[in-house]
Amino acid sequence: MSFCLIVAIFIVGIWGLIAKDNLIKKIIGLNILNSGVVLFFVYIGSFQGTTAPIMEKGIKDVVDPIPQALMLTAIVIGICLTALALALVLKLYQKYKTLSISQIEKMSKDE
């Protein structure tokens, strides 16, 4: 996977957060952004000519397992963040009957 593809995924995630008005689409953009960050750290943690860190005789060049372990933690945190965001969006939808941020802002000012 090339570095340009990872940057493209990251940019699509940022675009989803900035350009979309729908809260669900913003959460999807946040997940895409999280995936781009995880792929970036896994990409910089591996080098050409290295193998998986499996203990076998004769293997000297192995990939550092720390970035991979940290990214597993980041994936779990991302899932928890998504669940929390969806719960908050559900409460907003129950109150305002819309997922549009601009409409929610207008309705909250009228209260």
Image (cartoon, rainbow, N blue to C red):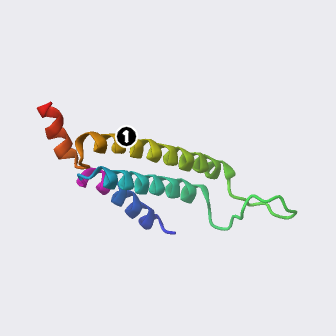
| Residue 2 in the image, given as x and y percentages of width and height | 48, 68
Identified at 35% across, 44% down, the residue is 90
Identified at 42% across, 66% down, the residue is 4
> Is 21 above or below relative to 77?
below
Residue 105 on the magenta segment: no
Residue segment shown in magenta:
15-20
Amino acid tagged 1? Leu
Left or right of 38 on screen, residue 100:
left
> Who is closer to the viewer here, 94 or 14?
94
Left or right of 55 on screen, residue 8:
left
> Who is closer to the viewer here, 108 or 38?
108
| Residue 3 in the image, given as x and y percentages of width and height | 46, 64
Q: Secondary structure at mark 1?
A: helix
Quarter of the image containing the C terminus? top left
Identified at 74% across, 61% down, the residue is 61
Residue 16 on the magenta segment: yes
Principal secondary structure, stretch drawn in magenta = helix
Q: Which residue is mark 1?
A: 88
